[in-house]
Amino acid sequence: MHPAIQGLLTIAIGVSGCVGYFFLSNQFLDKVLFPARGPNAGRNINRANMIRPWLFLLPALVAIGLYLAYPVVETLRLSLTDRVAGGGYKWVGLDNYVQMVAEPKFWEAMRNNMFWLIVVPAMSTAFGLLAAQLTDRIRWGNIAKALIFMPMAISFVGASVIWKLIYDARPAEQDQIGILNALYLFFGGAEPQTWLTIPFWNNFFLMGILIWIQTGFAMVILSAALRGIPEETVEAAVLDGANPFQIFFKIKVPQIWNTILVVWTTITILVLKVFDIVFAMTNGQWETQVLANYMYDKMFRANDWGVGSASAMVIMLLVTPILVWNIRNARREME
Amino acid sequence: MSDIAGTKPALRWIVQASVLFLVVLWVIPTLGLLISSFRTADQIATSGWWKSLFPSEQNLTLRTAAPDTQILENGMYVIEGNLFDEGQKATISKWGVSSRAVDAFEPGQTAELRRGGTITVDANGNYKAQNAEEFTGSRGPRVFVSAELPPEFTLDNYHKVLLAEDSTDSMGRAFFNTLTVTIPATIIPILVAAFAAYALAWMEFPGRALLIAAIVGLLVVPLQLALIPLLKFHLNIGIGKGYLGVWMAHTGFGMPLAIYLLRSYMAGLPRDLIENARVDGASEFQIFTKLILPLSFPALASFAILQFLWTWNDLLVAKVFLIDASGQTTVMTNRIVELLGTRGGNWEILATAAFVSIIVPLIVFFAMQKYLVRGLLAGSVK
């Protein structure tokens, strides 16, 4: 069957299946199981209402349980086992973790990830805040915002191609086609650099891509927060003779501090999962490995599910503090 | 906000200039790729894309028309014509007839041809080759020119990338595969999540708060954890790698965000509306389909855009759950990564392929930016 027809069929089956399930299960509950008539009408209505939420929730809970909750447990289990030749698993305790921390590539990935975790959220938030503050004050601000926001829609892979062209290097005697090298030579650089192979610094060239993508996100969120600041606080500061920088850093920033934190953590989570950029640009060569790509390497190239799962658990562990913080925030919100 | 900026013109100019700088910085990378996708391989390899917007000085090797077009004129064999393609407006500054002296002559001068005869070349590319004997051979004599060429762009790359039969370059199939992955993976989770979100927002039952907390927690669980367990699961239940698997995976992974976004929106709907409907005897199912779903359209649209962008741009999930050894089910992101590996130097193919994959999300982005912003706001500022 042609995939497109298969796709249309899936949409039809999926949608009608969903609607059918919800409709029929509700009908069944109200008409057959606990009909709202006869001697027990009142009791039946109550019982039906106790069950109904779970009818509504069931498909979603199955999807979430199967695709997100179960994998966490299963990955933990896999990280503590090894595959035995010919099928089956054997319990190896922490061997996979021991093997992993003995590998220099793992520590390279950890080190790089730490830099990613500091640099990308910090720079994206800073640029985003700057752009939000500046564009709020000018007439063509909305166009400017849309253009800075645009990279959000571009895939990491597409962005990688875009930036690969920027970082391109040609031999010194040829015309440069990468704009970075062209500028570098124009401003007196001695010879063209192959930016992506300069150990340590190449990490920052990769981070630049994610900053470019995420700044728009930070800008949009922070811009909304800035607009939510009560005018009176700013007006009072103006009357007291505060200069624009004081107003920005002492009046506005403290009031949107919570939003800044939310933006920061959202980008942090994204950074921990970043895979496509490194995979497409360098594939972890020249000391640019990161955890997510290390894990992919282990699982699908080396076929070592044990160590792969162990490194996935490391990513999970790094996310956990944010997870807890999010849940606490959400609960406070609900009360 | 009309505070300080309004009172100090200097500051206002600084603001304008800084924003302009930021915008240029943010647009230039994409612009470079876009322009490159309209240039030929030669142009991309020999000069930066920023130069293509202006006339450029180039060294070209051209040929006169073939000898079989010669005519006999006053006892001389003559080949006449223009060196450039029709419609091309170039200005020659120097030219030559030997590869060792490519700039030996000025426009208008006459050179001796190596195989007999003479040739005159004008600045606009008109030439006249004359010989007392007949010109022989299958091709005309070579002419080397240094010429200033106007900006020139071509659609050939798009033609090649989208329509070529040759499977190494073609993105056509990958484009449709991506679409096939994306559309069901956007629609189905919305429906499933909407019902759940309604239950979490407007039904009272024990364990509700706990469920919401769990969903908030699962929002940040890294996808990476799910890869191996679910691939194993898919292989066990017999769907293996394929569209069904990738649709299910995207549905599962998108679910927490969908429920979270929709629940917070639905919880904000006026209570009276729902209570009144209940008093009037509407069933929960009717309330949901007739009242909640239409009212929640903005939130549904927000999530649909986020999910569409995410599934369209995804590489990892497709690589793990969809793409098998046959290569028939590849998606665009994966094709581009392959091109980066095998044809890293072929910028014309790479740039065009990348742009084909970027253009759809960009259209969606600009058309529905309002909903996207709303979705991001609801998804994070809570």
Image (cartoon, coloured by chain):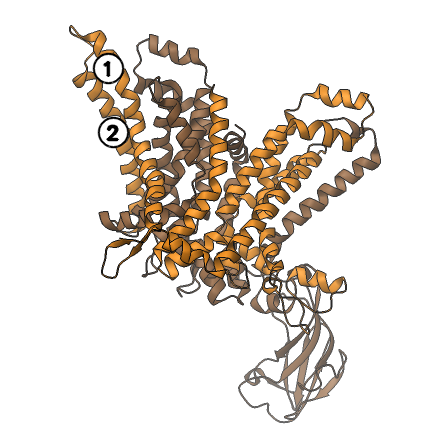
Query: Label 2 is placed on what type of residue?
Result: Tyr
**As drawn, which residue projects farthest toward the top?**
A39
Q: In screen coordinates, is A321 left or right of A59?
A: right
Tell me how far mark 1 sits from mark 2, CA to CA: 20 Å
Q: Residues within 10 Å of mark 2 (few under 14, many from 20)?
A: some
**Does the CB distance between marks 1 and 2 fall below 8 Å?**
no
Residue at the spot of label 2: A21
- Residue A218, compared with residue B268, is above or below; it is below
For the residue pair B307 and A204, the one nearer the viewer reads as: A204
Query: Label 1 is placed on what type of residue?
Result: Arg
> Which residue corresponds to the image point at 23% horizontal and 55% vertical from the top-left?
A88
Q: Which chain is orange?
A: A
Q: Can the viewer see residue A189 in this picture? A: yes
Residue B47 in percent (x, y) is at 65, 66
> Which residue corresponds to the image point at 76% horizontal and 38% vertical from the top-left?
B15
Q: Look at the numbered disc 1 and give the secondary structure of its residue.
A: helix
For the residue pair B9 and B123, the one nearer the viewer reads as: B9
Tell how many labels.
2
Q: In screen coordinates, is B263 left or right of A4?
A: right
* Mark toward the viewer: 1 or 2: 1
The mark that comes first in sequence, 1 or 2, is: 2
Q: Which chain is brown?
A: B
Residue B45 in percent (x, y) is at 60, 68
The disc at residue A47 is: 1
- Residue B244, compared with residue A63, is above or below; it is below
Q: In screen coordinates, is A106 left or right of A242?
A: left
Residue B231 in percent (x, y) is at 31, 50
